[in-house]
Image (tube, coloured by chain):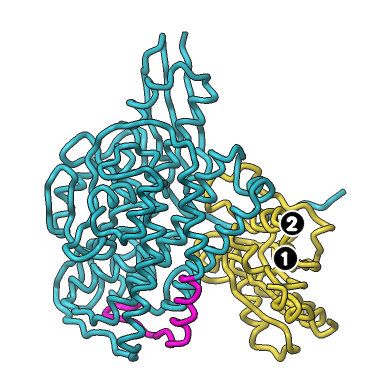
Amino acid sequence: MSERIEVHHVTRVEGHGNIVVEISDGQLKECRFDVIETPRFFEAMLRGRPYQEASHITSRICGICATGHATTSLRATEKALGVELSEQTKLLRKLTFHGEMLDSHVLHTYMLVAPDFLGVGSVIPLATTHREVVLRALRMKKLAGDICATVTGRHTHPIAMTVGGFTYFPKVSELKALRQRLVASRADVKATVELFASLPWPMFKRDTEYISLSKPDEYAFIDGEILSSDGDRLPIEDYQKVTNEYLVEHSSAKFTRHNRKSYMVGALARFNNNFEQLHPTAKEAAQTLGIKPKETNTFLNSAAQVVEIVHCVEDAINIIDQLLERGISPEKPAPVKLKNSNGVGACEVPRGILFHHYWIGEDGKLTGANCIIPTNQNIANLEEDMRAFVPQILDKSVDEIRLSLEMLVRAYDPCISCSVHVLKIEDRV
Amino acid sequence: MENLKTQCKETTLILGIGNPLLGDDGVGMRAVEILAEKELPPNIKIEQVGTPGWGLPAWLEGWSSVILVDAVQMGQTPGTWRRFSPDEIRLITHRDPLSLHQSDLASGLALAEALEMLPDQITFYGIEPACLDPGNDLSPVVRSGLPGLIDCILKDIRKE
């Protein structure tokens, strides 16, 4: 008996990818995840542009993690141009970064993952069957977006963040209002942990290499060193020794590998590598959710995102307290030193470690750029997971295998593209 | 929340929708930008919301009347604009969205409806786009449709 499972355009992921699995006489013959997006040439677009524009251009790589791309871009430029940031700039960047992390994690866990477990096909029927769950998600998402808007001028594609600092500063009253809403959101955060702790996560363990940023003094999101769960530690400038990008025939996205055949990045990798630095309330949430490092069930990447929701809410409150205690002072962006130079920026964006590497000429124009996004780094690992997972579920029906594989893909929260949002209508007749 | 609703009862929210980096998809955003420079009656609020997708219900909450301005594929000549109510049309939504990027306006409205968060009155102003390729500019034919559309919105809200 031979079965071929093809899922064209896996639903509820960002962009387009196909699952191809072929089973013959109870043996797995073929197993691939095809990325079928066309390349978008952002690196080529950056060549010849003034360094001040780079963060605004690369922010458009993604409408979900725009702040992540903009921050990583700014760090690459700032490293190249020898810019030293003020404490206030670092705090404001961390605060808006938390806003986007919350927005993305709420969107993924509630809108994309939860429907699989609550027996509905998407978030729209979920709104009827579990109205309170969807309203809670929208409340949390709105708060997350408002954090970004308060600090950087709008929900998506930050405008106030610039090389060396900010061009706009939130008012004390705005920060106080945000703090109040964050404190009030603790009830929603608690309900989120309880909801996801009650979900029947598929059992699937496969040890892999987990790669994330790491910092001595905090749960790393911006800057740090590259840390592998296999024990290696590298400066971010050596990112290419970790990513080792290569091409495969069936994917328009490049694959990566380090110590093993593949590695995983994202919330689960951060959780495994940096658990000790999570906020105590987030550690408690991990206990409620039943995960502890080293967790090797890929499906629990979504649970690790819930842990990070708790961490980001608590840490955002701490950051606002620090800002209120220091007072907000309008500062000029830190000065740049123009010369022929290059710099690497690295951040932990919602889906994992992101690298931007820029080469800048003495006229301030970019002469080259390299951006390596988290989803690329995860695809080889996703395929290894599929190869290990399919033999464990061969006794299920084809439909069940298909759904299980779709859920596995969604667990990675893959982000493959951005597209047009035009409305289409027809007349009622 | 109830207070908020009472307070906003006599007001109209105008939302500009679309992606201004994709040519004529940005026409809704541009239209409300022009509107914001006009002399408007009190209790009118204008927001450029871009591509809110499933976030749309949060924008609608508490408003009794909402005007949505967007590029709409209606099968008409590019630049043609039309005013319509939800009863007059069927939104073509992606029944099974392929990605978050297809959580479009129709999905946002469907979610708002499922959550019983739709305002009492919704009015669409749609312009038929000519070109949705990457770029900041509107095509001339779409730009030439804007003054008529804006006059009509102004008449609408001044009457209210």
The answer to whether residue A61 is visible is: no
- Image point 77% across, 72% down: which residue? B64
Q: Residues at marks 2 and 1, common chain?
A: yes
Q: Is residue A71 above or below residue A212?
A: below
Q: Which mark is residue B126?
A: 1
**The disc labelled 2 sits on which kind of residue?**
Met
- Image point 53% across, 41% down: which residue? A11
The answer to whether residue B39 is visible is: yes
Residue receiving disc 2: B74
The picture quadrant where one finds residue A263 is: top left
Closer-to-camera residue (A410/A47): A410
Mark 2–mark 1 Cα distance, whole angstroms, equals 8 Å
> Which lettered chain is shown in cyan?
A
Is residue B153 one of those drawn in magenta? Answer: no
Relative image position of residue A231 (x, y in whole percent): 12, 46
Mark 1 closeness class: few <14, some 14–19, many ≥20 residues within 10 Å: many
Relative image position of residue B35 (x, y in whole percent): 67, 82
Relative image position of residue A261 (x, y in whole percent): 22, 34
Q: Is residue A283 above or below residue A327?
A: above
**The disc labelled 1 sits on which kind of residue?**
Gly
- Total number of numbered discs in the rendering: 2
Q: Which residues are magenta?
A: A161-183
Classify mark 1: helix, strand or loop.
Answer: strand
The chain containing the residue under callout 2 comes to B
